Amino acid sequence: MSTNPTEPSSAQACVIGVDFGTLSGRAVVVRVSDGKELGSAVLDYPHAVMDAVLAATGEKLPPEWALQVPSDYVDVLRHAVPEAMRSAGIDPADVIGIGTDFTACTMIPTTADGTPLNELPGLETRPHAYVKLWKHHAAQGQADRINQTAAERSESWLPRYGGLISSEWEFAKGLQLLEEDPELYALMDHWVEAADWIIWQLTGKYTRNACTAGYKGILQDGEYPSRDFLASLNPDFAGFAEEKVAHTIGALGSSAGTLSAGAAEWTGLPAGIAVAVGNVDAHVAAPAAKATEPGQMVAIMGTSTCHVMNSGVLAEVPGMCGVVDGGIVDGLYGYEAGQSGVGDIFAWFVENQVPQTDKDAAVAAGISVHQYLTEQAQDQPVGGHGLVALDWHSGNRSVLVDHQLSGLVVGLTLSTKAHEVYRALLEATAFGTRKIVETFNASGVPVTEFVAVGGLLKNRFLMQTYCDVLRMPISTTGSEQGPALGSAIHAAVAAGAYPGVRTAGEAMGSLNRAAYTPDPGRADAYDRLYAEYETLHDYFGRGENQVMRRLKEIRRAAYSKATVNA
């Protein structure tokens, strides 16, 4: 820490962490010395997620699309950061750095100076000109071709991703853009992760972060997939890596530059403070939970769940999202897996499947519908609903890596109640997590501690269900702002307050060890349900039954026909 008397002392120095989520951005003010959170603020994105229609025109979007407007992210800097500072009641001069994290893989097509294509005159009506959010799954066909071709050619990078890459990632989405709107593809100078674009807006300098480059951008051992491989997918795609994606890589926790005068005006922060290299919401949360040692699996549980873990060994884990040297902290291999739908599934059910009588009862009780359904379901014995569900409403990220798959509930009868289906969906997400943990264990990368972070921790019944299903204790972070706190920790390192992310995490993070412990009786009962989940998992996900994929094809064809007829 600097001893310059004009700068804040170590006792009062603060950093800002900004977490850009799926529906909103959250800023938190954190004290550098001990990680105390002094103030926070949230801004809901004005345009939310465009998954049905394009806001600018009202045009219907095809199935599996999910777009956003990049100016919404700048609005977070303009509004949430100053509000967080006001709530903290500190002098802006005490802030020494700012760090950010983003959902991934969230991609923005830009010009050479970083202008998003949707902001160019005449292009606001073109869907491909907008942000493709992480849960944009319309590039599954391109992902399938990438996987098939890579397997046929025995591409050396494929095992680093568990044998499959996802439709959520940079190359699949980029190939979709090329093949569906080649004119826009030609206009695009950079295919930019939102995690890096927001840093570009803060510093005026484009720096690509090592995390998304490795996990989502197929950068392994310093190399992207070859021109020859990319040309085999589409001749016009040959130069994608070197022309649209490749750029200077910034190490995690390092400084990407300093806050520009323009960004200082937006945020109310001092110009010239350190701006940390961008990062992913899941990966920054590990040091916030003091979970950077090998074997500590961190689950960031929100609309989706991302599972990250460090290890000293390099192994192939089937269906993992990737393994990157230093992908979470220096000196260890960072592994990633995940579930594409968790909180989103619960929200879908509440919004679309709950009868009005239950909604009215929740209002009368003064609680949310989620809480009401939980309270109705939690005292039922395990298996008492006679149901088992698959958590694939947004496809399967791990271990099957297939977004053609869809949700399923088996066992419904005319006496089934809404709260019973809700509980079955909660359990299904726990079963999906168990499948991931067991796959890591079987692959020589053992999970020794499970650490939960994120908004879903407030549902204690859900957390106990996970604990019983996993048959292992669950530790929790002491912060409700795990990713934002993690970004603040990276900001402290970028500002020079700590020598590294692991050291900063120990000082600024928090962890409640074994906050939940498994109940042997419930765990035994869940083993029986999990066996049924596995049967359905393999039958629909691995077997010859292609009904889910065929239904997706029928749906796409129906929308395509309707568009032509219109």
Image (tube, rainbow, N blue to C red):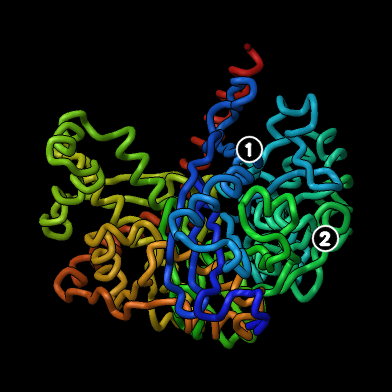
**Residue nearest the observer in this picture, 128 or 148:** 128
Mark 2 lies on residue: 246
Q: What amino acid is at disc 2?
A: Ala
Secondary structure under tag 2 reads loop
Quadrant of the rendering where the C terminus is positioned = top right
Image position, residue 37 (x, y; %)? 43, 67
Residue drawn at (79%, 40%) of the image? 178
Q: Is residue 107 left or right of residue 454?
A: right
Q: Is residue 415 left or right of residue 204?
A: left
**Residue nearest the observer in this picture, 276 or 291:** 276
Outermost residue on the front side: it is 5
Mark 1 lies on residue: 69
Which numbered disc covers residue 384? none
Secondary structure under tag 1 reads loop
Cα gap from disc 1 to disc 2, whole angstroms:
24 Å
- From the viewer's perspective, is residue 315 above or below residue 302? below
Image position, residue 371 (x, y; %)? 22, 48
- From the viewer's perspective, is residue 229 above or below residue 558? below
Q: What amino acid is at disc 1?
A: Val
Residue drawn at (38%, 80%) of the image? 449
The reply to whether residue 540 is visible in this rendering is no
The reply to whether residue 14 is visible in this rendering is yes
Residue drawn at (28%, 46%) of the image? 410
Q: Which circle, 1 or 2, is nearer the viewer?
A: 1
Q: Residues within 10 Å of mark 2 (few under 14, many from 20)?
A: some
